[in-house]
Amino acid sequence: MRKANSYILEEIGKSLEEIPDDVIDQTIDALSSARKVFIYGAGRSGLAGKFFAVRLVQLGLDVHFVGDMTTPIVGVGDLTIILSNTGETMSVVQTANISRRLGSNVIGVTSEPSSKLAHASNLVICIPQVCNGDKKENAPLGTLFENAAVIFFDSLIPLLMKILDQDENDMRHRHAIWV
């Protein structure tokens, strides 16, 4: 367990260091200026996106997860954030293409900068898989991508709090269990 833990933490740190500052700045600008934010991902990538959606709701943003029954249509002035490790999942690529066609700004989060998702996105956040040969043993399938995405998104929250003039108390009042 300790070997896998150390490996995962080290590899995530290396991956996140590879994301350029200008991509982070563009992501913050897009989030802070969006009319509505839509998030989508299939499987565990979708769960990573849902974690981020909860934080954005707590910041007071109008956020929807694509595929939920109450999700409105995307449009001009909106932001759609789509996660996929491979960037090739059919539903993910279709969502990116439809969102752009309807006028939404699309941010693709993937480990593959030349993927179909990357090509369909206005901005790509590439979370590279900089890992050594221990990947299969200590972090199978999309473990590194999904965990790195969660940490990347959580690391944006303090920046957004400052820009949106929100503090922890403001966020607590929007917490789902009304504490």
Image (cartoon, rainbow, N blue to C red):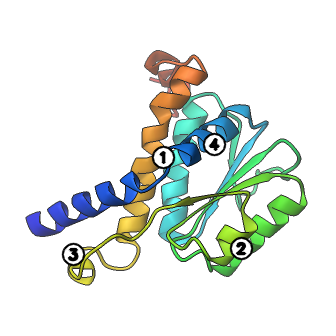
Q: Decide which of tag 1 and tag 3 comes sooner along the chain.
A: 3
Mark 4 or 2: the one toward you? 4
The quadrant in which the C terminus is found is top left
Q: CA distance from mark 4 to mark 2?
A: 21 Å
Asked whether, in this view, residue 112 is left or right of residue 101, the answer is left
Quadrant of the rendered structure where residue 82 is? bottom right
**Residue at the (49%, 50%) spot, across then down:** 20
Please say whether residue 15 is visible from this viewpoint.
yes
In space, the residues marked 1 and 3 are separated at their CA atoms by: 23 Å
Under mark 2, the amino acid is Val
Q: Secondary structure at mark 4?
A: helix
The residue that mark 4 highlights is 26
Q: Residue at label 1?
A: 153
Q: Report whether 44 appears left or right of 6.
A: right
Crowdedness near tag 3: few (<14), some (14–19) or many (≥20) residues, C-alpha within 10 Å: some
* Disc number lying in front (1 or 4): 4
Q: Given the image, on which type of amino acid does mark 4 rest?
A: Gln
